[in-house]
Amino acid sequence: MATPTETIQAMYGAFGRGDIPALLAMLTDDVHWEHKGSIGLPYMGVFRGKQAVAQWFGHVAENDGIQAFEPREFLAGPDHVTVLGWERTQALPKGRVFETDWVHVFNLRGGLVCRFIGTYDTAAVAAARA
C-alpha cells in the first residue's frame, strides 16, 4: 500500500494530467470535500461523495484557467497529509491573473482520501475578478 504522501502525490499527478477519473478513484465513496473561501465561487463550500467532487472539479475548470500549480511541501502523519503550495491562475472569463499560496489538508482511510479541506488567498482571487 502506498504511503499517505505517495497517494496525495499521485492525486496531484492525476490532476496535472487532467485525469479526474483516476483522481476520483483515490477517494472514498463518502468523501467530504471542502474548499473554504468568502467570494462566492461555485467551488467554495462542502461537497460530499465522488459525484459531487467531480462536479467540484468542473466548477474549477469553468472558473479558473490554471497556468501553474505547484504543491511545494508535504507534511505527513499516519493518516493525513498537509500540502503547502502555490498557483498562478487566470480568472475566467475576465482573464485577470492572480497568484496565491494555498493549503490543502487530506485525511485518509484505508489508503483512500476521505476528507479534503482547501483554502487560499481569497483577496487575491476577488481582486482578479473585480
Image (cartoon, grey):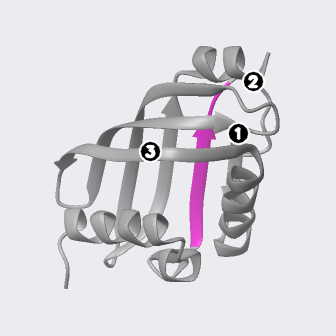
Residue 44 is tagged as 1
Residue 68 is tagged as 3
Q: Is residue 35 magenta?
A: yes
Return the residue at label 2.
39
Where 73 sits versus 10, above or below? above
Helix, strand or loop at mark 3: strand
Tag 1 near tag 2, CB within 8 Å:
yes
Helix, strand or loop at mark 1: loop
Give the alpha-carbon distance from disc 3 to disc 1, as whole Å.
20 Å
Of discs 3 and 1, which sits in the foreground?
3
Callout 1: 10 Å neighbours few (<14), some, many (20+)? some
The C terminus appears in which quarter of the rendering?
top right
In this picture, which residue range is highlighted in magenta? 30-37
Give the alpha-carbon distance from disc 3 to disc 2, as whole Å.
21 Å
Where 102 sits versus 24, above or below? above
Side of 42 where 37 appears, left or right: left
The first of marks 3 and 2 along the sequence is 2
The first of marks 3 and 1 along the sequence is 1
User: How many marks do you count on the picture?
Assistant: 3
The first of marks 1 and 2 along the sequence is 2
Which quadrant of the structure image shows residue 80? bottom left
Q: At which x and y percent is residue 6?
A: 21, 69
Residue lying at the far front in this picture: please name it. Answer: 95
Q: At which x and y percent is residue 94?
A: 81, 31
